[in-house]
Image: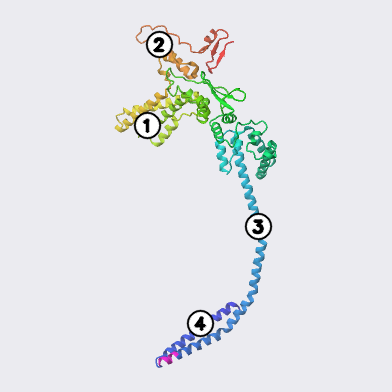
Amino acid sequence: MSNFQRYMNFDQAQRRGEAALDAQTLSNDFNAEANPTRLRSIVADAGRREVDTRIAEATEADKVAISGEAARQAPIATDQAQHNLDHARNLAPHQVNLASATATAGKANAAAARMRGFYESLNLVQQGNIPAARQVAAAYGEEIPEEILTNTTFLAQVSRIAEAAQARHPNSPANQEKFIQTALEGLQHETLGQERTADPTFVYNVPGAPEPATVAGTDDAASRKMQALIQGGVEPEQARKIAYGQLRIHKDPVTNEVTLVDLGTNEIVPLRTQGAQEEPVEPVGVPTPGSEETLYGGADNAVGAVPTVVDLLSGVTGQFSDELTAPDVTAARQNFNTAQNELIRALSVNPRFPVAEMTRIREEIAIDKGIFNSPERARLQMSALDSSLRRRLVQEQETSVDNSMPVEARKNARQAANDISRFLEVMGVPQIDQMSVDELNAMDPASMTETEIKRASDRLDLLLGGASGTSGEPTEPAQQPPQMTQGEAVRVQSQEEFDALPSGSLFINPSDGRTLRKN
């Protein structure tokens, strides 16, 4: 008989017992109608005991069968438990191995991430982009050692070690990292010996590396000065020597030329800037006399490599403050900033210019004064800005007198036109097409672009060699426009003028503006 059948029989027996109990209860209730209360209670109890006895008798066999089945199932459950235990014991080594492999992979990924950050930041340091290098290193949880930033010789050695690590272990960042660490330790030992391995100045004792005047890493002020100079565009090695007192800035009181003096040899060396052009760019487009107070006329003092470095050194290195205080540089910079900010502030409160339009105007008038800029480029930017703002000025002036526009709109347009006019006046870009003969003659061709010279010549032709008057009266013979010269050089406008020059004469090539000597 199956366990299920036994359970069914047990259930049926219980049901029969309950039915018998119900019948007996009904019978007892019937008898209770004629018997006293005590008698009814005794009879009822006897009936219940009789029913319980019959139920026990009916289910005893089933209980015995169920107990026997449980006894037979016990060994099976024990075997299953033993099997589960054995399986867990067998699986444990695999789980341990998997955990170990996961940890190893995690270490490899971490090493790969560190090396990516190291190589990327090292590359940025080599390019001179120190802020970006610091940012990349920080993103990978690293910090660039100060010695790599301050010693070009050591930086070159680290770069060679990094290249060797990648060549020897191309597929293992962890081994590359270990190789670099070992090589750097070896370089440190080789340079100083075992007894001075922990010396923080060891990098300056690398063969060929210059010795600083003070201890790097302990002179925080010098380090900050050096970093400020590097970020401002000074060549790193010169920045280090300036910060540590090996080079001193010198400004010629007559020519205003900025040079450096090597205090060890008294040798004068040129100031080198990162990304600077090999040859200086000649300034162009000098405005009319008396306009040096304008932004256009002050471009030589406000932009370019040397003015930027002079301004930087004046603020960063206190030892040069007396020698490098440059009122012309400071005033020109302030004029740039003040004029731009005033125009932006004036237009930003004008309802005619929404946020998007103000953003475009702000970008348009933001003339770059960075280290890689030049006076020539600044003047070109200002000339382009002048043309753009004059077009906008015409639009605002037309709107201000347009009777079809609301009164408030005309008022705002008139205010915008006044603000733009003031800025154009401060910027002071020369309007060659509106100059008189005297103003044109006062211009210096040596500091003009080819386009400006062409426009000036055309303007002179128009003013001095115009056509016959409308009245029919004869006009005076047209005067030849005066030749514009650059020192002793003569600007030639035609082949005939060139042929007329004596041999050995200096002339200005009209195609590229270069000064040449005729054979």
In which quadrant will I find the C terminus?
top right
Q: Is residue 39 magenta?
A: yes
Identify the mark nearer the N-term, 1 or 2: 1
Q: Nearer the viewer, residue 415 or 9?
A: 415
219 vs 356, nearest the viewer: 219
> Quick one: label 3, few (<14), some, or many (20+) residues within 10 Å?
few
Question: Considering only order in the chain, which callout, 4 or 1, is on the residue closer to the N terminus?
Answer: 4
Q: Indicate the secondary structure of the residue bearing disc 1.
A: helix
Colour approach in the figure = rainbow
Picture residue at 65% right of the left edge, 51% below the top = 104
> Mark 4 — residue?
15
What is the three-letter code of the residue carrying label 2?
A: Ala
Amino acid found under the numbered disc labelled 1: Ala
Report the residue at 52% width, 25% height from top.
306
Q: Residue 60: x, y in percent? A: 57, 84
Count all numbered tags in the image, as a single digit: 4
Residue 88: % across, % down: 65, 63
Q: Which of labels 1 and 2 is toward the front?
A: 1
Residue behind mark 3: 96
Rounded to the nearest whole Å, what is the CA distance between mark 2 and mark 4? 135 Å
Position in image of residue 33 (x %, y %): 39, 91
Task: State how far apart marks 1 and 2 are (Cα).
Answer: 46 Å
Q: Which residue is mark 1?
A: 346
Q: CA distance from mark 1 to mark 4?
A: 100 Å
When the figure is inspected, residue 485 is found, relative to residue 318, above or below; the finding is above
Q: Quadrant of residue 409?
A: top left
Front of the two marks 3 and 2 = 3
Mark 3 or mark 4, which is nearer the start of the sequence?
4
